[in-house]
Amino acid sequence: QVQLVESGGGLVQAGGSLRLSCAASGRTFSNYAMGWFRQAPGKEREFVAAISLNGGSRDYAGSVKGRFTISRDNTKNTVYLQMNSLRPEGTAVYYCAANLGYAGYNDYGRYDYWGQGTQVTVSS
C-alpha cells in the first residue's frame, strides 16, 4: 500500500501561482512513477502531468505545458506540481497518484494509488 497526501491548494487570482505537494508513505516511493490529475465539477478526471521513477521523463497535458512543472524528491518521498500563470479553467480538485510503471502515464486507470485531492480555485 502507498498512502498519498496532497497539500498546497487554495484560492488564487488568474495569473498567479501555486505549488502543490504530495507526500507518500508506505512502500518504496522511488519504485513508482507519479502523476497529477484534476477533476472539475461535472467533468471527467483529466491528466495534468507525470514523472518517471527517477525524474528522467516528464510529460504534460497540452493545456498546461510551459506553465506547470512536475518534480520529485525521492529523499523526501514527495512529488510537486508548480503551477504558474493559472487560469480560471484550472479550477478543480487536483489529485496525485502512483503507478508501478510509466507506461500509460496519462491514463488514470493505470494508477494504483490515489490521494484524497486538494482544491485549487482560480478567480478571474
Image (cartoon, helix red, strand yellow):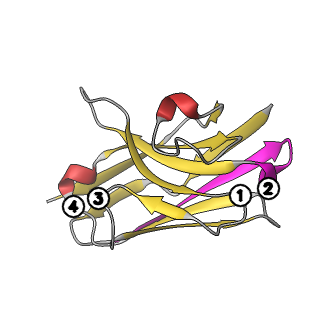
| The label number, if any, that marks residue 30 in the structure image | 2
Instruction: Name the side, left or right, on which 65 lies relative to 110.
Output: left
Which quarter of the image is occupied by the C terminus? bottom left
Q: Position of residue 97 (x, y in %)?
A: 59, 41
Q: Amino acid at mark 3?
A: Gly
Q: CA distance from mark 4 to mark 1?
A: 29 Å
Q: Position of residue 19 (x, y in %)?
A: 49, 66
Q: Nearer the viewer, mark 2 or mark 4?
A: 2
| The label number, if any, that marks residue 53 in the structure image | 1
Q: CA distance from mark 2 to mark 3?
A: 26 Å
Report how many numbered discs are placed on residues in the image: 4
Q: CA distance from mark 2 to mark 1?
A: 6 Å
Residue 44: in magenta span: no
Report which residue position mark 3 lands on: 62
Q: Are marks 2 and 1 in contact (CB under 8 Å)?
A: yes
Instruction: Answer with mark 3 or mark 1, whichever residue precedes in sequence.
Output: 1
Which element type, helix, strand or loop, lies under badge 1?
loop
Magenta residue span: 17-31
Q: Amino acid at mark 1?
A: Leu
Instruction: Answer with mark 3 or mark 4, whichever residue precedes in sequence.
Output: 3
Q: Amino acid at mark 4?
A: Arg
Q: Amino acid at mark 2?
A: Ser
Instruction: Answer with mark 2 or mark 4, whichever residue precedes in sequence.
Output: 2
Which quarter of the image is occupied by the N terminus? top right
